[in-house]
Image (tube, rainbow, N blue to C red):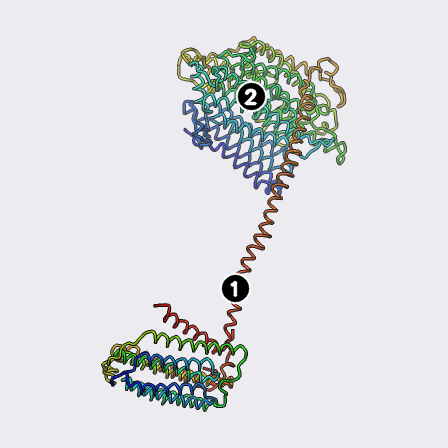
Amino acid sequence: MPSTVPIEWYVALTITMFTIGALGVLLRRNAIIIFMSVELMLNSANLLFVAFARHLSDLQGQVLVFFVITVAAAEVAVGLALIVVIFRSKHSINIDEINMLKG
Amino acid sequence: MNAFGLAPLILILPVIGILFNGLVGRRFVVANRKTGEKWSGWFATAMVLGAFLVSILLMYSLFNNDFHAEIIPLFTWINIPAANLNIPWALQIDTLSVTMMLVVTGVGSLIHIYAIGYMHGDPNFSRFFAYFSLFIFFMLILVSANNYLVTFVGWEGVGLCSYLLISFWWDRVDKDGVPMNANAGRKAFVVNRIGDFGVILAIILLFWTFGTLNYQPLFESAIEMFTSGQMVEFGPYSLPVGVVLTAVTALLLLGVAGKSAQIPLYVWLPDAMAGPTPVSALIHAATMVTAGIFLIVRSEVLYEIARESGTLILGLVSSPDLVAYVGGFTALLAGLIAFTQTDIKKVLAYSTVSQLGFMVAAAGMGAYVAAMFHLIMHAFFKALLFLGSGSVIHGMEHGHHEISQHGEEDDFDPQDMRTMGGLRHRMKTTFWVYLIGSLALAGIAPLGGFWSKDEILAHSGEHLVGVYILLLIAALCTAFYVGRMLQLVFFGKPRHEAADHAHESPSLMTRPLIVLAILTIFGGLMNLPFIQEARAERANNHPESVYLGLEGWLEHTIQAFELTEEGVVHLPHTPIVLSPTVAGLSLLLAIAGLTAGFIVYRKRPKTATDPDPLQRTPIWWLSILPLNTLYMKGFVPVFNRFAAWLAFAVDWNFWHDFVHDNLIRDMFVTFAGFLADVIDAQGVDGAVNGAGKVTRSFAGALGRLQTGHVRNYALSIFLGAVALLVYFLYFAR
Amino acid sequence: MGNPLLFIILAAIAIAAALGMLLSRNAVHSALFLVLNFATIAVFYIVLNAPFIAMVQVIVYAGAIVVLFLFVIMLLGAEQLRALGSVSGSDRWQQILAGILALVLVGVTIIALLQAGGSGSEAIPLIDSSPTALGLELFGSYLLPFEVTGVLLLAAMIGVVVLGLSKKRGEDA
């Protein structure tokens, strides 16, 4: 293909997705939605890594993405387990009600 | 054998006694009176006996050392190199100091033993012995010193102990409410101080002239300076050494007059009888008062140079002759005063003054050995007499206790001779020893007192006829008042029931008396003229010194010498031969005086209130010169007013009220208040509390960040992340 | 880097899916939008010459993680919750702040990108990104992180099991 997509486009896309994910973390009250937003953020970072791996002809970007996916999976598992546990005691997943660590 | 190393023990042992009795002795006495007194008293006595033993050992060491003096340094006392002032504390063990040590510790230990019995029952028993040990300590410092300043330390110290011991019963008041013991102590101290003033000036002059105060170098350089005609510089003036030494010896005479109770400073000694009798015996008869004579004998070189220089004080008399005349007049005056005393201890006090006059006169005339001989003998028989009088007083008190029903007749004075009489039968031991002492005092051969007094008379007969006459009349007076005393106390009939019921004192008191009596009888053997003659012969044939008699013993320290242009020429010993005229005359006068006293007082006074037989004769007005009145009316009020001014105006109003209270205390309080209220409460507390408050409010503010809401945390993270990104993009190129 | 047109289409889908996930009231709908986003990302990966990663993305993310999400949503009955509910006063300013920050972030970045200028559009050679090459890289220089990640997964598993224990047993443990 003669014309390629400049790397800056990918950066812009990534930033946008990341911002949407951040807004999701900040604005939503449902804990599960917040989790999903975090996953979105992670994904945007992954996308950028792979884009740069392609751009710099370096395989290490993909290796890192590999690891990130793994860790994200583990994190989701543990986080959802935590939410289940909290739900058992508080019967709510509205994170505004989870403020027992109020200082 | 060489026991010089033991010399410091003579100082250490009394200190142990002081510490024991001062610190723990009281507990022993309080716990169990009988055994406690034994512990306290015998401990002190053991210390003095120990010192006596050491003195004997030192005597033997001197024998083996060819009688050469030994200096045993203890430590460097004052050392100021910038002023060339180096005064060590060292012991000078020579024949003179050992003689004094033996007298002090020997007679002292006997008096210690006596005092255990005499002070029985006194609530301050151990304090007494602590003071006694303190006195022995200072007296030994005085005699064993090797320089003038350390001697002066001892000089002052014995003055202090005299004060402490005279006013031992300081809380007793007589019937007018006057604390007579305390006053007597103070009088002794103040009068002594006047004498000390002279001694201090003399010491300063000596240091200025010779640059050292140690005896041996000082004396050597004195002789050198005198024979070489060197002058002493006093700023723009310069004086020959002889004149300076005349001044020094005259100033020393002032000190001697204070310490040894000569005219005009004898007034404290009769008052000092307010102290317990052992004190009177030890301090005011045997040892302290002889310190003056010791000082003169020690400074023999200075006196001889003063004599040789021919300098006359006020153009009248040379300094040593002045000493002799002062001694002579004192002897006569005190002897006359003793005629009229009714208190037995006062008689002995004036007798002491008189005998001290004999000694001082002898020393002034250059008869140093005679003076020392009389000093030793006088120590024996005067201590004997004082202790004997204590025994008599003890007996009278017991008698009074027996007859009185619970404190009636409170103004009974057990020391008043007018109430005594006939005690010869009731107190036999005391009588015999007292008789021996009295005869020795009067100068009856062959008791010791005769030999020593006779030697002085002989010397004076050869040198200063005026002094000879004075001393002869004084000897006559001595015999008279001795006879009077004996007659009033021991003979005749008791003039009071208390005397009737008197009984002998316990053996603890009488045994030392017996020992002293023996010493009195045989003490004269020390320096009999015959011995001196034999010695002189031997010395002239064999130039090596030969020890024989006191004269030979002392000669190694006090040598007769003559100063010529070639320097010092030690005179060969020319003994005073026993001239039958002098000896016979004095003996005759003694017997005459005694007899006269006996006769006058034989039958009268019959009762205690009868007037003294002498009062009807016109002799009595010869008694007390107005010196005592002068002191009481002239000096005492002025002194009291000055002291009161110092106490109230200067010390109390100015120093305490103004300086201390207002100035220092108020200033301090204000400053402390400032520190406490302003700096501490507001400043420091404010800072500390403020720091706490700030932290708390800050923490409180920060704590509000911990909302517990995850979203807020996330927001802050996001905020931080964005800020970082902006920074890295734009500002961290 | 692919065809610009393809990029734009895919980017639009991805952003739309993200927005859909953000704004959807129903949690299940959000999850489904997320799946769409993941799938789009996977396509991106393929375009960017990372086939293995793309497959891993589909398998792990879309296949396992989102399924897990859906399980939990069903378990907790969370689809009834409202989305952006009522906000209290103090929360309002936080939301506004969040919006501002988001705009700042995007704006700053885009401005920076525009200022950076083009990096050239030469063709960049493709590298070997087959599983073999990736495997060699993983087991070569990244062996330690690989093993550590394995341990991490183990720990996560154990943690999940522990957390998932029932109340009674959970209190004892």
Left or right: where does residue B49 sit relative to residue B346?
A: left
Give the residue number, with chain letter if any, for mark 2. Answer: B377
Amino acid under disc 1: Thr
Give the residue number, with chain letter if any, for mark 1. Answer: B695
Residue sitting at 71 percent across and 21 percent down?
A: B492
Q: Quadrant of residue B636?
A: top right
Q: Quadrant of residue B660?
A: top right
Q: Is residue A18 above or below residue B490?
A: below
Where residue B130 appears, as percent x and y from the top left, is: 57, 36
Where residue C142 appears, as percent x and y from the top left, is: 28, 77
Q: Are marks 1 and 2 in contact (CB under 8 Å)?
A: no
Q: Is residue B585 above or below residue C18?
A: above
Where residue B80 appears, as percent x and y from the top left, is: 45, 30
Quarter of the picture holding the N terminus of chain C: bottom left
Where residue B101 appears, as percent x and y from the top left, is: 51, 27
Subunit under mark 1: B
Q: Is residue A17 above or below residue B113?
A: below
- Real-space CA distance between mark 1 and mark 2, rounded to the nearest whole angstrom: 94 Å
Which comes before the other along the chain, label 1 or label 2? Answer: 2
Give the numbered dot on residue B500. none
Secondary structure beneath dot 1 equals: helix
Left or right: where does residue B173 sit relative to residue A49?
A: right
Q: Nearer the viewer, mark 1 or mark 2?
A: 1
